[in-house]
């Protein structure tokens, strides 16, 4: 079992930055992928970014490339999402998630077994 706790969300203006954090606890030795998804009312939960435990193995949704950066500190069992140049369309609840097996898709939320409670990010125009 893996427990995830997100933090760092808030209300910002367009163009501002936020840094989200997600701390994992429990059975953390098999957290192969740690990633971020987001969801707005009435829409499907969508992929944002994910990272394999190997440094440099990062993947991003096209909508956030060049603006968001995911990083991971394996010693602290923590994943971060640095969000720059935020846009109103980035407004969503952001969820941290863990994919504990190699099989499946790295960007399919159904393949992630563990989820945090989410943190709200609101970007005003």
Image (cartoon, rainbow, N blue to C red):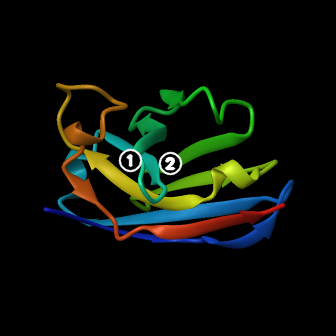
Q: Where does residue 101 sit, x and y in percent of width and height?
A: 17, 35
Mark 2 falls on what kind of element?
strand
Q: Which residue is mark 2?
A: 72
Residue beneath the point at 54% across and 30% down: 61
Residue beneath the point at 71% across and 62% down: 18
Quarter of the image with the N terminus is bottom left
Residue beneath the point at 20% across and 45% down: 30
Whether residue 91 is situated above or below residue 33 in the rendered picture: below
Mark 1 falls on what kind of element?
loop
Question: From the viewer's perspective, is the residue at label 1 or at label 2 nearer?
Answer: 1
Whether residue 120 is situated above or below residue 55 in the rendered picture: below
Residue 45 marker: 1
Gap in angstroms between the C-alphas marked 1 and 2: 22 Å
Q: Where does residue 64 sit, x and y in percent of width and height?
A: 65, 36
Q: Earlier in the sequence, mark 1 or mark 2?
A: 1
Q: Where does residue 59 sit, x and y in percent of width and height?
A: 50, 28
């Amino acid at each position: 079992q893996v427990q995830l706790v997100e933090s760092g969300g808030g209300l910002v203006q367009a163009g501002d930055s936020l840094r989200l954090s997600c701390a994992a606890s429990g059975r953390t030795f098999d957290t192969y992928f740690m990633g971020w998804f987001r969801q707005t009312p009435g829409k499907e939960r969508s992929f944002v970014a994910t990272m394999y435990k190997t440094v440099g193995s990062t993947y991003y949704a096209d909508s956030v490339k060049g603006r968001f950066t995911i990083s991971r500190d394996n010693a602290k069992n923590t994943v971060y999402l640095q969000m720059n140049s935020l846009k109103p369309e980035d407004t969503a609840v952001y969820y941290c998630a863990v994919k504990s097996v190699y099989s499946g898709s790295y960007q399919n939320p159904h393949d992630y077994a563990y989820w945090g409670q989410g943190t709200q990010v609101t970007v005003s125009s």
